[in-house]
Image: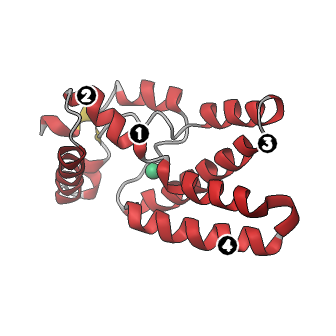
Amino acid sequence: MLPQYHIILGAVFSIMLFLIFPQGVGLIGAIIFFLSSFLIDIDHYTGYVIKKKDWSLKNAISWHMKMRQKLLSLPRKQRNKFYGMLCHLHSIELLLVLLSASIFISQYLLFVALGFAFHMLTDILYQPTYWDRFDKISLIFDYFKYKKLKNLEDI
Ligand SMILES: [Zn+2]
């Protein structure tokens, strides 16, 4: 899902959370949830930096748009044979670490975990619009799955 949709959905849901649970969430919790709901996608940038050894945000965005176009230009069945890159923040493993850390370090990490989980849920719901599998749930699962697939860049 493109970042602008994540921002809109994150804004709507964080406002709803704040209005429904004003005492439990609080303004700071709602803001952290909102920011986390789209800033998780920073792993697309860091993944690009690691892969291409290039710090340019502009290049990273255009590379991702090019990969997206490449994927969408393929017939649906072909798309299932490719992957783009590992998204290290989109993972149930990190959610578990954040949930544990929210107990022992700071309660605000709970809102980071909730924002990330909300983002991941919207990504999961969006994926059936372009291929027949679910990525970006588990980093470990994706790592082993991608070893059997081809990289989109190699087309
Ligand atoms: Zn995402």
Q: Position of residue 40 (x, y in %)?
A: 49, 46
Q: Which residue is mark 3?
A: 107
Q: Choose between 43 and 133: the one closer to the eye.
A: 43
Confirm or deny contact between disc 1 and disc 3 (CB under 8 A).
no
Q: Choose between 135 and 66: the one closer to the eye.
A: 66
Q: Residue furthest left?
A: 155
User: Could you tell me the amino acid type at mark 1?
Assistant: Asp
Q: Choose between 150 and 34: the one closer to the eye.
A: 34
What is the spatial separation of the Cα atoms under label 3 and label 2, in whole angstroms?
34 Å
* Disc 1 residue: CB within 8 Å of ligand 1: yes
Element type at mark 4: helix
Q: Which residue is mark 4?
A: 15
- Earlier sequence position, callout 3 versus callout 2: 2
Element type at mark 3: loop
Mark 3 or 2: the one toward you: 3
- Name the disc covering residue 43, or none: 1
Confirm or deny contact between disc 3 and disc 4 (CB under 8 A).
no
User: Could you tell me the amino acid type at mark 3?
Assistant: Gln
Q: Position of residue 12 (x, y in %)?
A: 60, 74
Which quadrant: the C terminus?
top left
Q: Position of residue 64 (x, y in %)?
A: 24, 49
Q: From what the image shows, is residue 95 above or below residue 62?
A: above
Q: Position of residue 43 (x, y in %)?
A: 41, 39
Q: Which residue is mark 2?
A: 51
- Earlier sequence position, callout 1 versus callout 3: 1
What is the spatial separation of the Cα atoms under label 2 and label 4, in whole angstroms?
36 Å
Residue drawn where x is 23% and y is 44% of the image? 60
Element type at mark 2: helix
What is the spatial separation of the Cα atoms under label 1 and label 2, in whole angstroms?
12 Å
Disc 1 crowd rating (10 Å Cα; few below 14, some 14-19, many 20+) is some
Element type at mark 1: helix
